Image (cartoon, grey):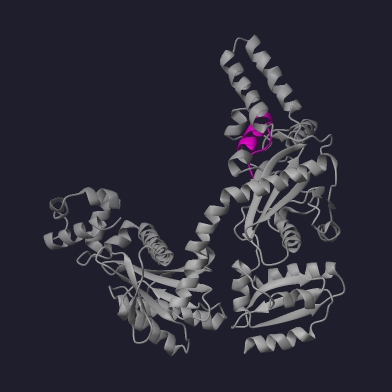
Amino acid sequence: MYLEAIKKKLSLLPNKPGCYLMKNIDGTIIYVGKAKKLKNRVSSYFRGKHTGKTARLVSEIVDFEYVVVGSETEAFILELNLIKKYDPKYNILLRDDKSYPYIELTNEKVPRLVVVRNINRKKAKGTRLYGPYPNVSAARETVNLLNRMYPLRKCKTYQKKPCLYYHIGQCLGYCTNQVDMNLVKEMEHDIIQFLKGDHTLITKKIEEEMLAESARMNYEKAKELKDLRDYITITLQKQKVEMNDNVDRDVFGYFFGKGYLSIQCFFIRGGKIIERHSKIFPIIDEIEEELTRYIGKFYEKDVLLPKEVLVPDIVDAELLSSFLGVKVLKPERGVKRKIVDMANKNAEIALDEKFELIEKDEERTIKANEELKEILHLPKLDRIEVFDNSNLFGSFNVSGMVVFVDGKPSKNDYRKFKITLDKNDDYGTMKEVIYRRYFRVLRDGLVRPDLIIVDGGIGQINVAREVLSSLNMNIPVVGLKKDDHHATDALMANDPIEYIPIDKKSNLFYYLERIQDEVHNFTINYHKQIRSKGSLESVLDHVEGIGEKRKKELLKKYHTITKMKEVPTSELSKILPRPVAIKLSEFLQNYE
């Protein structure tokens, strides 16, 4: 049915540049691409045989839209904007890429050195950012080194009296003392030179101090300075490249094999490779399209643009240069070409090293998710929402919801629920949390899951289904049956409910087990958090037989839960009646 409608649309497509948007059965946009010739590119999805991720995409397409534009540059810009707007599941974004730390020399009258990660708000003209650094520890070590050598301001706000840094010689006491600003400017100059990769000034300064301390026979201090010099020489001198300039540049390389595209980026600062970035992902589009798109998106996420970007020859350098606003080159010979080749080689090595792990991860996530979809006869299974409840003798009643998208945890979507019902009633708890969650989904137009899993029995499944029915929502609900060893051995699904056995050696079993562990740990941690936030007073409120007078006596004598847990029941009986003391002691022993 859908294929006939698609064929009719394909015949109307023009051979002009533009963007296309693939949709699934819900009308959700699942992929965005661009093409020089729309008709040729879009038609290619529905011709021949596809494998891997492309096959999965095509199996979900029931419709598409397209937008014709005037040039390929316009198509590229529109494509990136549409990806940002719709966040399609089959477009590779930088969701799981790490952000890199930078060092900022603030633009204050007396500057400070700070480590920053979120640099998007810092990209304003005149901001002094240096990096990226391999990790936060490396950036902090560099800041500590510079603060030790140069007594800059450390405090965010000026204090009324000099702080510890002043007394140990790492600050000039800017809050109370008049400081020669020329000295501050000299320190700024040296620091900037260092952060740009020139370590000679600081090394020279350390060596002068080292000789002076040695002359004073202060050998311990001289040894400390020698170690500092060695640290700079060995640790901060990164891999040198054969370039005679100090231009900041990023170098991209790639390798394609086994259906995956591997990308490497070298960050070259001060003539040295200070860090590298690696990404491997299955591709749907043409290699050059995927690579060009990835580089275009790369600088949207906490990565500063350098003065120059070097790319392989398959990339549209002119298009990228126009989009990024910096010089993008495809070197054909010389040192720059060697560096691009080196990035290409590193991309190949990375894919060879990681391919087996990537394949296993896909089998245990995406393929296991596909298997679950087939078993439950679902048209699609992009999003699963999973619920678990936790309480202690009916107190501190909470529920947790975890979310799996395309077989992987989506931690930003996790939710915690503090239950208003303050008694041990699993059905009542499930009823409340399902109603609260899906009433809000309806009210706020949130994304609906394709499947709900409750970590409970038939009763909890039926309660969840009743609540959804009252909200006129048709979302499948299943449960996980456990064996005598508390391990998942079957799915409880369908209507009427039946048990679907799961092979304990299958990827689906490990997938469901991971889902179960994830929701259980998330809920238990929230439960502990709620309990730990409660003061001793609130804990005592949950024990029957302890009123205001007895509570005050206990608080006055023991102060903390830890102390009270160590007290024998006979000791508590001096303040409480014995039955109440036993009840309190039992409650505390179960309280973590």
Most distant residue in the front direction: 48
Q: Quadrant of residue 523?
A: bottom left
Above or below residue 525? Residue 174 is above
Q: Position of residue 57 (x, y in %)?
A: 62, 73
Please name the residue shown 79% across and 67% down the image: 76
Can residue 128 be seen from the camera position used here?
Answer: no
In which quadrant is the C terminus drawn?
Answer: bottom left
Above or below residue 462? Residue 303 is above
Q: Is residue 361 left or right of residue 352?
A: left
Q: Quadrant of residue 151?
A: top right
Q: Nearer the viewer, residue 184 or 364?
A: 364
Q: Magenta span covers which residues?
A: 141-156
Please name the residue shown 59% across and 29% down the image: 167
Please name the residue shown 51% across and 75% down the image: 381
Above or below residue 233? Residue 58 is below
Q: Nearer the viewer, residue 184 or 86?
A: 86
- Residue 503 sits inside the magenta stretch: no
In which quadrant is the N terminus drawn?
Answer: bottom right
Q: Nearer the viewer, residue 294 or 114?
A: 294
Q: Nearer the viewer, residue 87 or 40?
A: 40
Q: Position of residue 417 (x, y in %)?
A: 42, 70
Q: Is residue 157 left or right of residue 127?
A: left
